Every structure is written in C-alpha cells, then in structure tokens.
Amino acid sequence: MADQTIDFSVAEKLGLNESEFEKIKDILGRTPNFTELSVFSVMWSEHCSYKNSIKYLKQLPRSGSALLVEAGEENAGLVDIGDGLACAFKIESHNHPSAIEPYQGAATGVGGIHRDIFTMGARPIAAMNSLRFGELDRPHTQHLVKGVVKGIGDYGNCLGVPTIGGETYFHPSYNQNILVNAFSLGIVKVGETVSATAEGVGNPVYIVGSATGKDGIHGATFASADLTEDSAKDLPAVQVGDPFQEKLLLEASLEAIQTGAIVGMQDMGAAGISCSTSEMSAKAGTGMTIDLNKVPTRQADMKPFEILLSESQERMLIVCKKGMEAELEAVFDKWDLECEIIGEVTDTGRLEMYFDGEKVVDVPSDDLVLGGGAPVYDREFERPKYLDAIEAFDINAIEDISLNQIGEITKALFGSPNLANKRWIYEQYDSMVRTNTLMTNEPSDANIIRLKGTDKSLLCSVDCNSSYVYADPYKGGMIAVSEAARNIVCSGGKPVAITNCLNFGNPYDKEVYWQFVHALKGMGDACKKFDTPVTGGNVSFYNQTQLPEGAEPIYPTPTIGMLGIMEDYKQKMTLHFKEKGHIIMLLGNMKNDLGQSEYLKHIKETLISNCPDFDLEEEAKLQKVVMQLISKNLIESAHDTSDGGLVIALMESCFHHGLGFTIEKHDTDLRWDAFAFGENQSRVIISVDPSKVADIEALCNQSGLNNHVLGIVTDGAISINHSPLGQIQDYKTPFEQTLDHYLN
C-alpha cells in the first residue's frame, strides 16, 4: 500500500470526500503518502472531528460556576463538588462494534469510558449504561442483549467499579443498529488532575499499558459510516478488551501521577496513537517526533499505518518530565506493564513519525484536529415528512377504556420489555463493590453513590425516551434533560451538570439532521433552565443500516447523563411507599394525553402519535417544590410518573414492601386511558403522613403547583374508584418475569 499511487480513489476508500482530499494536499503542499492519508482519514472522521455537529454543540451551555474545565477541554467533564473534591464524568457510545460483536463491543466501551476518567487522575467509582435494542422476540436481538450485558458485566465486575444503574429500551428502529452508551464517574482531589497536553520541548513521550495489535484498526472510521449487510466483514475494527490489564493500568496511572513525573496523559481510544499524539501536541502548540519501531507490538510485521491506527485497548500516551524517567518507569515496572519511550516533544508543531529509519509521517498536528484544519460543515436540514402524520394524530380516534379494563391492561403492559423489571440485566452487574452504593436495597429514581469521609453523595441518572424525540425533537430533547433532573430531584439531590451521548442517523440525510438540530435546541433550553451546563460527551452519527429496501435510521436518541449532589446522604428520598395509611398525592397536572405512551404502542399497536404534553416552566416549578418538600422532611417517598403513566408508577411504588393503593379519579372529563396510562410530563407521586397533607398543599398552592390527593396506601389490595383490581402480587409476577421469559 505504501508504494501505491495516492489519488482520490484511495482517499474515498478511507472515508474521505474529494474536497477533504484536496484540502489535505493543500495543507501538506503535496500529495500525502498512504500512512499520512490514513491518519487524516481517522482524525477527520465524524467520530474524532465532530465535523458535522460542532456548530450546534457550541450552542449548548458549556460553562458554569461549578465547572473546572469547559466542555471539550479534557477527556471528561470536571465539576467542583466541594470539600476539595472534583467529579469527572462522561458518557460515550460504542454502538457499531456492539452491533457486530456484542460482547467485546460492549466490554471495550466500558473500558474506554473508564480510561477517560482515570487518565485525568480521577478514580472511577461508579458506572451506568444506556442500552437500546430491537424487538425482543427476535432471536438476533436476544443474542445481542445477552452478549452486550455479559460484556458490560464481565468487564466492570473484573475492574472493580460498581454498575449502579442505567436504562434499557426495546424498539423496532434498533433491530439492526443497537445503541450501547457507557457512563463513568470518578473522584479526584482538586488540583491533582492531569491534562491531556504535550508541553515541554525535549520531554520524553511514553506509551504505557498493553502492546499494540491489529484489533480496532480504522475503528473511528467504522463508527463514522452506516452499517450494511457486509459490516460483519469489518470485525477487525472491533477492539478486544482485557479488564485485568485495565485494572493494572488504572492503579499504575494513579500512582504515577503522585510521583509528579507526568506532564500530560491521554487514553488511546478512537484513532489510537494518531489521536493522542496529535491532540496532545495541538493543545500545547508543540509537536512530536515518534519512532514507531519502539512501539511494543503483539503481532509481527505490523505496518506503520496499522501501528498508528490500531485501537488496541488498555493503552495510554504519557509525556514525562525530562529527568524523571526513572520514577515513571519504576511505577509501571511494579505493575508489570509496558512502559516504553517512543519519542519526544518538539517545538515544530508537527507530527514526525519514523519507521525503519524512514520518515513516514510529517504533518502539522493542529491541522489534524478540530479547531485546526479539520473540516467543519453546516449541513442542510428539512422538516421530516413523517411529522405530518404525527401532528394529525387525534386522541378521539382512540376508543377509551372502562375502569374494569385497567387491571388486565396493567398486567399486559408489564409484559412489555420496556416496562418490565430489568432484574435479568442488573443482577449480572456488581453494584455493591467498594460499598459506596446507597440505593440497592431501597430504590430511588436516581442512582446514588456515597463519598466516604464526607456526608455528601453524588446522584446520577441516564435518560432519554427516543419515541418522544422522534415525535417532536425539540420537545423530546427538553424532556430528556428534564426527566434526568427530575429523577435526581425526586431522590433528594440538586442537578449540577450533564454529559450527553447524541445518537442519530446519517447527518447527510436532511431529515435526520433536522432531528439533530432541534433536539439540541431543546436540550440547550432545558439545561439553561436547570443551570446544568454540558461538560462533554460524544456524537454518534451513522446509526443507520443500509438494507436492500433502503436506509433504516434509528429513532433519534440524545441520551442524557446527569450529575447531582446531595450534601447530606441522610436526605436521600426513595420511591416506594412505606406504610399502610399514608396519603398518596400527585404533584402536577393530569391531562387527556396519550402521546407516545407505552399503552398506545404496546396495547393499541399505534406507533404514530404526538409527543406527550410538556411545559418547561411547569417542570421547573415542580422540581423546585419537590426539593423544598424533601428538605423540610414533609414526604415519605417521591417517584416521577414517566414511562407507562400513573398506574404503572403507583405499582412501582408498591412493589418494594408489597403494599397496595386505593385511588379515585374525580375529574369526569378525564379519559380512563389517559388517567391510568397517559405520559404527560412534570408529574410526581408522593406519599405522606396524613398529618402533613395540609402543609404540603399550602406549599404547593403558594408556588402555584397543582396538587391532588389521589388516595391512600393499603396493605396490598388495589382499587380505583372503589373497584377492586386484585392484589399487588398479581402485578408483580409479570413485572419480574418478562425478561426471564425471553432471555433464559
């Protein structure tokens, strides 16, 4: 390949378009060789350069008083959480690899996101994930679910980081192109972080960790193209993980930071050595000279482009202070890890790579990265035609149900994989390792991790209902942020910041790009309302499968990972009812709304409907009141009503203690189906001691928040408007057994 004539036909095979190929020639003042062209192709891929998204990413709120670094400055977001501590957190996708090889794709997604955290000097203390699969009755989907869950569990459990929560949805739009989004959160002392920079001319450059192999070559390019029926042939683009090696690398990296020998450090994720050398150099305004023969390899006769593009896992690039090489090498020798000098920092602003004594790469480092020479596009977009049918949806065309149908419909809804208990999944994850997890035995809407040595806890939530975003990208984007915040508030915390994983179809599709633009606007407006700036994340385009009958994009899925803080962990609020006789109240409005509900999709088999009603001002008002109620110790439980609607949320509040409820619908204008299963937003169920109802009503009325006394907690019996609907155990059984039925 090194000897072949380089023209556009070669560039096109590497994923570059003609204008990009011409721009590369202009930058270099000559035609690139194959190795250089390969480096440009991965660095200018969407996965690395964000060339099709950066314009709108920059419009998101990216700074705030608690942020220690702005979005995009480092490998992960960094938030000041007080007491001299900072939290590093991030969510990223590993979608295409998981669709092709689910076990390794998911496992290496977990490993990669944790490296982004500890490369900054933070110890990972919690993990979550957001998963999307196709229809669960399909054998292929079952194969993918089993592989992904096992990959996540095996890697995280071996690494010793608890997986404390997440979400899993099933929908036909993910039949071919699944989503695997991995979230990690870590803790570091303020002032002890490490930057991904290559400062100091003459400082040695090390590669540490695992040897470099041929796995993952062109993984970034693979992630920046549609899946096709031939994508399985790209299996070498899927990395192979080793969690035990990652554990050694984690401990060695954190120990090496304490020596003071490290100037800069970056994980070798997407694009491997190409990415870490160029980004660290560009950030510092320096350059590097690298001898590729010194890179430890685990396969013979690797070519320069293979070494540069390999995405072999469990590797870091480190810039060491000159004169402290012995201290750095001693740490990695102690942990029995490769630690080799492969080059040094220069003042040229160029990456100069040598192999067998020949210079095989000579390019300006800044021109490889976003903000330098990488292209930035402003794609055309247009309103999707399918929205015409959605906007024409009329609830009156759906026949209402009767009261006596609610029980059987509820059982049927718990037979939907989206509403069923995800025990089959989460029991494969170690959620209690390191003994900091607070919500395992008493569930909350958000996931809570205690900070030892303080009274503080961190709360985190991952949320996105892609059906809402599909029906109305702007409103759906607002709801994704708002629900994540609502989950944190209902658990006793204060939302602080978000990370996001923006999963969409092909950006060259004008309707897909319209979804992207409007979803980001909705996210941004909600983040501004809740003062939760965006710390970073990633964009995953090309989640679209090319089939003989045409392209099949996923539903737009802008997954939100939100961080919250609880100053005193004893302020934790759980979602379950505590005692018979407690009063059940609903905060927020009940409306004749069935839009995009699980009821419509699963029971009525209606996929075309409007996004559920949502008002950002009402949502902010609700969250403020819930925080006040919790701080004043006025309530016993809090649980938001979301997927499945009111009756599903009530059942979830009953399951933990085997309690029941009796409630009444007083509004005769409210449809029974909307009352029981509608998913209009900005609603929270609370349970309260009868003596505190008047205080709660007064506070709500003072704030202008609608509130309703629904009924009372019972000893296990269920009834609505005095109509008996059985015992709570009648509903718990299908809730807990649905996934087992499909996956065991």
Image: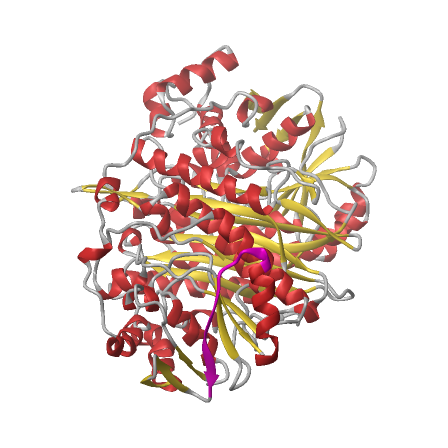
The quarter of the image holding the N terminus is top left
Q: Nearer the viewer, residue 178 or 493?
A: 493
Majority secondary structure in the magenta region: strand
User: Seen in the image, is 595 located left or right of residue 220?
Assistant: left
Q: Position of residue 79 (x, y in %)?
A: 68, 47
When the figure is inspected, residue 416 is found, relative to residue 558, above or below; the finding is below
User: Seen in the image, is 352 located left or right of residue 720?
Assistant: right
Q: Nearer the viewer, residue 7 or 529?
A: 529
Q: Is 712 inside the magenta-drawn segment?
A: yes
Q: How many marks?
A: 0
Q: Position of residue 651 (x, y in %)?
A: 41, 76
Residue at point 56% right, 29% down? 355
Question: To which quarter of the image does residue 697 belong?
Answer: bottom right
Residue at point 53% right, 57% down? 622
**Residue 489 visible in the picture:** no
Name the residue furthest left: 549
Q: Position of residue 514 (x, y in %)?
A: 35, 34
Look at the image and give the residue range highlighted in magenta: 702-714
Question: To which quarter of the image does residue 106 belong?
Answer: bottom left
Question: To which quarter of the image does residue 347 belong?
Answer: top right
Q: Position of residue 60 (x, y in %)?
A: 54, 36
When the figure is inspected, residue 278 is found, relative to residue 264, above or below; the finding is above
When the figure is inspected, residue 665 is found, relative to residue 610, above or below; the finding is below
Name the residue furthest bottom: 715
User: Seen in the image, is 318 located left or right of residue 549?
Assistant: right
Q: Nearer the viewer, residue 88 or 61?
A: 61
Q: How is the image coloured?
A: secondary structure
